[in-house]
Image (cartoon, grey):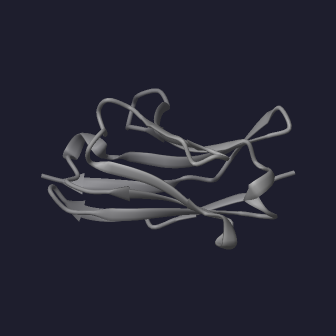
Amino acid sequence: QVQLVESGGGLVQAGGSLRLSCTASGSILSINAMGWYRQPPGKQREVVAGITSGSNTNYADSVKGRFTISRDNAKNTVYLQMNRLKPEDTAVYYCSADYIGRRYWGQGTQVIVSS
């Protein structure tokens, strides 16, 4: 069983930055991969970025060069640094963790980017 708690969302002007955090219960060393997804208003959930247990990363084309995913195993935390934010980045952001064949989700954190 894995529990995920996100934080760091909020309201920011276009061009600004936010850092999201996702803290997992237990040691994330045993988690295969973690990621960030988002669900814009009225749209389906979409992948934003992922990071493996070996710290290999991947990103959606829409965020490449602007967002950075990282993990701190000592703090059981995964981060999403979001720079040069755009209004189209507005969404509820969810953290995910793949553990023993199952995907776990956090409760989500709202990000609103004003133009």
Residue at (81% x, 64% y) in the render: 26
Residue at (24% x, 54% y) in the render: 113
Q: How many numbered marks appear? A: 0
- In the displayed structure, 3 sits above or below 90; it is below
Residue at (75% x, 56% y) in the render: 29
Q: Residue furthest bottom?
A: 75
Q: Nearer the viewer, residue 28 or 14?
A: 28
Q: Position of residue 35 (x, y in %)?
A: 57, 43
Q: Position of residue 57 (x, y in %)?
A: 49, 41
- In the displayed structure, 55 sits above or below 100; it is below
Q: Is residue 101 visible?
A: yes
Q: Quadrant of residue 12?
A: bottom left
Residue at (87% x, 51% y) in the render: 1
- In the displayed structure, 72 sits above or below 63; it is below
Position of 29 with respect to 115 (left or right) is: right
- In the displayed structure, 27 sits above or below 86; it is below
Position of 67 with respect to 12 (left or right) is: right
Q: Nearer the viewer, residue 49 or 10?
A: 49
Position of 91 with respect to 105 (left or right) is: left
Q: Nearer the viewer, residue 108 or 22?
A: 22
Q: Is residue 3 visible?
A: no
Q: Position of residue 102 (x, y in %)?
A: 80, 35
